[in-house]
Image (cartoon, rainbow, N blue to C red):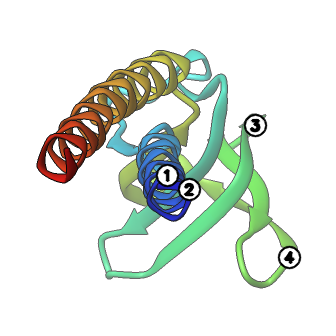
Amino acid sequence: MARTMKFVLWVLLVFAAAFVATGCSTTHPWRTVPEPWTAKGFEGVERARLERADGWKVELAAPRWVERAEGPALAGKVVGEERDAEIALAEITRIEAQRFEGEALVANVATATLLTIVVVLVVGAIVVASLSIGFTMGA
């Protein structure tokens, strides 16, 4: 009995951790930023992937909007190289941005919690049923 309950608790813990981890990983999705690009559109952006017409790509951490005499640019640290870069928006054909989405985290954690409760109830019902069958058969 104690061995069964210990196994059930481990299964539930792994199950809950898997759901929470999955939920947390989907709270930072990449989304295409539609044109026209504005400074306001980059508020709260954690990372940005920039692509030029010639296929050149770069990913910036903590991108920020910069006004230059030649026109606006995005500046930030190049991911993987840890150097600063500033790329004029006139050169860019596509931008994807990554933001933290708190609503997605709340929804994912709520779903994981609900599914964990359901699994606990189902496993509990199975354990109780198996114990009562065992007692009945032994009597």
56 and 27: which is toward the camera = 27
Question: For the point 73% across and 82% down, which residue is it?
Answer: 80
* Residue 42 vertical placement versus 12 (above, below): above
| Quadrant housing the C terminus | top left
What is the distance, in whole Å, between disc 4 and disc 3 at their CAs? 19 Å
Q: Secondary structure at mark 3?
A: strand
Q: Which residue is mark 4?
A: 82
Q: Earlier in the sequence, mark 4 or mark 2?
A: 2
Per the model, the C-alpha gap separating discs 4 and 2 is 53 Å
Q: Nearer the viewer, mark 2 or mark 3?
A: 2
Q: Residue at x 45, y 48 (%)?
A: 12
Considering only order in the chain, which callout, 1 or 4, is on the residue closer to the N terminus? 1
Crowd class of label 1 (few under 14; some 14 to 19; many from 20; radius 10 Å): few
Mark 2: secondary structure: helix
| Inter-mark Cα distance, 3 to 1 | 59 Å
Question: Which mark identifies residue 66?
Answer: 3
Compared with residue 112, is residue 14 higher up or lower down, i.e. above or below?
below
Image mark for residue 111? none
What is the spatial separation of the Cα atoms under label 4 and label 1, in whole angstroms? 49 Å
Crowd band around label 3 with a 10 angstrom C-alpha radius: few (<14), some (14–19), many (20+): some
Tell me the element at label 1: helix
Q: Secondary structure at mark 4?
A: loop
Mark 2 and mark 1 residues within 8 Å of each other at the beta carbon: yes
- Identify the amino acid type marked 1: Met
Determine which residue is flagged by label 1. 5
